[in-house]
Image (cartoon, grey):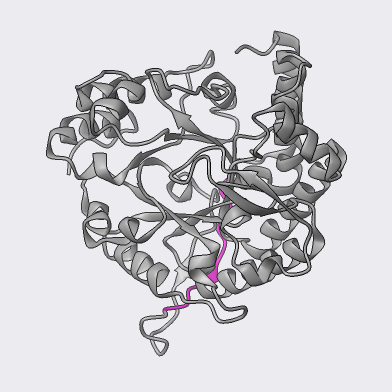
Amino acid sequence: MRISRLRCVLLGISLLSCLSWTSLPARAQRQDHADPARQRREAVRCASSDDATPNGLAVVIPPGEKGYQSGNLEALNNPFVSGVAVQIDWRDIEPVQGKPDWSKLDALFAAAIASPKWVQLDIFPGFFSPEWALVGAQTDLFNLPYGPAHGTVAKLPMPWDPVYLDRWFAFLKQLSERYGNSPAFRMIGASGPTSVSDEMTLPSDSPPAVKKWLSDGYTPARYLGAWEKTFHVYADSFPNQCVSLAAPGLPILERGESGRPARLRAKEDIVERAVKVFGRRLAIQSNDLHAGHAQVEAFDGTDFINSYSGRIITGFEMRGGSQGAGPSQVMGAAGNPPLALRKSVDKGMAANSSGRHINFLKIYAGDVRAPDMQPVLQYAASLFGKSKP
């Protein structure tokens, strides 16, 4: 996908007016949960210097019990990995309102600080909200469009519902109080008006689903209003962190008949709105990087994300792991996981027309742990300027 030269110029001017890449040191106190009496330390605000910007390879720890097995936490010790992106469902942290269980995240932050690695938090509400958060909120039943529970029917709160959003924002405040001053915590994925993950996607993959959304009151203005409110809550709650926006766009429009130019303009509009709120702390990413072919293909956001590289923080997350015949085919080389991962890395790290590439690349823990993947990880790390342990 290519943006017209005139639009690039105008968009570049707009972004440059919002972003200031001068180094501005900022001081914040760190809370040490393992030892409350320990002296507080200084933290550096995300994007206040090149060293504090999320950069390099990050290992993805998926949600569920398997994601928090010791082997995945040990992947943080990989010498070619610079960060960790942990995915966890809201209902697994706060099953009871006001009584969050921080044990898994405490262990994750302890491992990241010991490594040391930077942390991105991707916490999933939407389908994975605790039941108490949906009481009194407008909900409807939809098929999960992707992920491990793909195809199952579950209750989803409307992205704009104030009861649901206010409870989610209250949780974010608790999260910020717990980890907001940790020097390892560099980025958080913006969620809330979401469904399966932190992506700006909704289950709208069929005409009946779109019809249901319209009957539930969906309008672009209502959806964008929820995201505008969410942007401001994240900006205020996490002043020390970068905030990532995954798969920006209008999900109902993606399935409509308005054509690629309209979809592209919607994506650009979302990014422009986010830049006005977050400035240089904004990161945009696509979570569907792969060099092969999947049975169901989503919008390929590679060129779109890469078009912003060098102007704002950009990154990719692999569509999934490369282990096994099926996954390796999707990632680019059936039966050859290392080659599949290498091809996907090359696709994601390709330079744009300005010679710039993404800031970070997220690879699933199974690939990071695999012995035969280490040469590929070393190669990938070298593209970010880190090739030796």
Q: In the figure, 342 relative to 230: above or below? A: above
The residue shown at (70%, 62%) is 236
Relative to the observer, which residue lies in front, 96 or 28?
96
**Please, what is the dominant secondary structure of the magenta stretch?**
loop
**Magenta-colored span:** 22-32
Place of residue 322 in the rendered image (x, y in percent of width and height, measured from the top left): 28, 31
Relative to the observer, which residue lies in front, 197 or 76?
197
Q: Is residue 369 left or right of residue 191?
A: left
Question: Is residue 150 in view?
Answer: yes
The residue shown at (67%, 28%) is 206
Q: In which quarter of the image is residue 361?
A: top left
The residue shown at (68%, 39%) is 19
Place of residue 232 in the rendered image (x, y in percent of width and height, measured from the top left): 75, 55
Q: In the figure, 178 relative to 214: above or below? A: below
Residue 25 in magenta stretch: yes
Q: Residue furthest bottom?
A: 37
Count every numbered label the image shows and give the total: 0
Relative to the observer, which residue lies in front, 127 or 228?
127
Residue 119 in magenta stretch: no
Name the image quarter holding the C terminus: top left
Question: Is residue 191 in view?
Answer: no
Place of residue 67 in the rendered image (x, y in percent of width and height, measured from the top left): 34, 56
Place of residue 77 in the rendered image (x, y in percent of width and height, measured from the top left): 22, 54
Name the image quarter holding the N terminus: top right
Q: In the figure, 314 relative to 144: above or below? A: above
